Image (cartoon, rainbow, N blue to C red):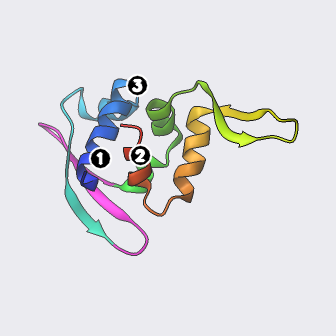
Amino acid sequence: MENKEILQKAIDKAIANGFGLKENFDNEEITVSDQIYKDSFSEGYLLRSTSHNYQFELASIIFSHSFAKAFWGKEIIETGIWLDNDEKQVAIAWQYHLQQLVLCENPLLYIEKFL
């Protein structure tokens, strides 16, 4: 999948789970346009609706707490890490996955696994 398609599906999933981005677009259909810039530190896209265009930096959405909560949820998950007492570590899903996302070289590939 291309970055644009991953991002579109991720935003759609997050909006379906309560991510507040759609409030900025008066509940219109939101589409991700092509990448509008990329430099060594950031990457930008344009969101479009029938009546609005909104330019945003990729990191400002995918690394936000509100996006992570809507995308991964608030349930308790096992992290796959064993503790000293032979129990698996648990965490809140959105917090765990947001930490993992920050460590990724390509965060969109990490997000793609959960679409």
- Tag 2: residue type? Ile
- Residue 94 magenta: no
Residue found at the far front of this picture: 86
Is 13 rendered above or below residue 48? above
Instruction: Identify the amino acid type marked 3.
Output: Gly
- Between disc 3 and disc 1, the foreground one is 1
Disc 2 marks which residue? 111
Evaluate if marks 1 and 2 touch, with contact meaning CB atoms under 8 Å apart. Answer: yes
Q: Name which residue lies at 37% across and 55% down.
A: 58
Q: Which residue is mark 1?
A: 6
Query: How many numbered discs?
Result: 3
Residue nearest the observer in this picture, 34 or 86: 86
The residue beneath circle 3 is 18
Q: Residue at x 44, y 50 (%)?
A: 110
- Please state which amino acid type lies under the numbered disc 1: Ile
**In magenta stretch: residue 40:** yes
The x, y position of residue 1, in whole percent, is 25, 51
The image quadrant of residue 18 is top left
- Whole-percent x, y for residue 77 in the image: 62, 29
Looking at the figure, which quarter contains the C terminus? top left
- The magenta segment: 39-56
Closer to the camera: disc 3 or disc 2? Answer: 2
Q: Earlier in the sequence, mark 3 or mark 2?
A: 3
User: Is 49 situated left or right of 38 in this image?
Assistant: left
Lower position in the chain sequence, tag 3 or tag 1 = 1
Q: Rate crowding at label 2 as few (under 14), some (14 to 19) or many (20 or more) other CA atoms within 10 Å.
A: some
Coordinates of residue 35 in the picture (x, y in percent): 23, 60
Q: Secondary structure at mark 2?
A: helix
Specify the quadrant of the image occupied by residue 40: bottom left
Q: CA distance from mark 1 to mark 2?
A: 8 Å
